[in-house]
Image (cartoon, rainbow, N blue to C red):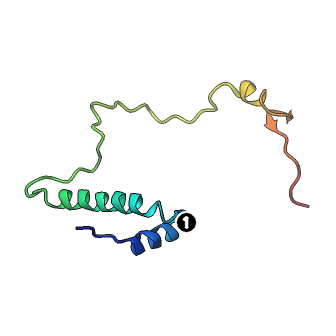
Amino acid sequence: MDMIDDTTTKKIAKLSRIAITDEDVPYYKNRLNGVLAWVDQLQAVDTDGIEPLTSVLIEAATPQREDIVNDGGYADKVLSNAPESKAGFFVVPKVIE
């Protein structure tokens, strides 16, 4: 049984600012119904007694570097890409009078 019909599919596409043709509607309707069926499967999973995760990352498996602010050490290389630079800065056209 489809939870989303053609009319709802068109409305969702319009709200999402996605242009779809009448020929596209069955494809997107099936995709949307598939997502909702998958959500129903997830809701059926028994999670009693399971502690919620605060993060999917395990800190021991993903070591973190120390957060140190620096300029990267290669400002000259970055500025070499600029059409014009002066005193270590990009030169841009004036936009405010």
Residue placed under numbered mark 1 in the picture = 17
Q: Residue at x 9, y 57 (%)?
A: 46
| Spot occupied by residue 29 in the image (x, y as percentages of width and height) | 37, 63
Q: Is residue 30 left or right of residue 66?
A: left
Tell me the crowding category of disc 1: few under 14, some 14 to 19, or many 20 or more residues within 10 angstroms, Cα based.
Answer: few
| Spot occupied by residue 27 in the image (x, y as percentages of width and height) | 40, 57
| Spot occupied by residue 64 in the image (x, y as percentages of width and height) | 38, 33
The mark total stands at: 1
Q: Nearer the viewer, residue 70 or 29?
A: 29
Q: Residue at x 8, y 55 (%)?
A: 49
Q: Nearer the viewer, residue 16 or 25?
A: 25
Q: Residue furthest front?
A: 23
Quarter of the picture containing the N terminus is bottom left
Q: Residue at x 13, y 56 (%)?
A: 45
Q: Is residue 67 left or right of residue 47?
A: right
Q: At label 1, which amino acid type do we have?
A: Arg
Q: Residue at x 52, y 63 (%)?
A: 21
Q: Is residue 5 above or below residue 62?
A: below
| Spot occupied by residue 13 in the image (x, y as percentages of width and height) | 48, 66
Q: Is residue 91 left or right of residue 9?
A: right
Dot 1 lies on which element?
A: loop
Q: Quadrant of residue 84?
A: top right
Quarter of the picture containing the C terminus is bottom right
Q: Quadrant of residue 63?
A: top left
Q: Is residue 46 left or right of residue 40?
A: left
Q: Nearer the viewer, residue 31 or 50?
A: 31
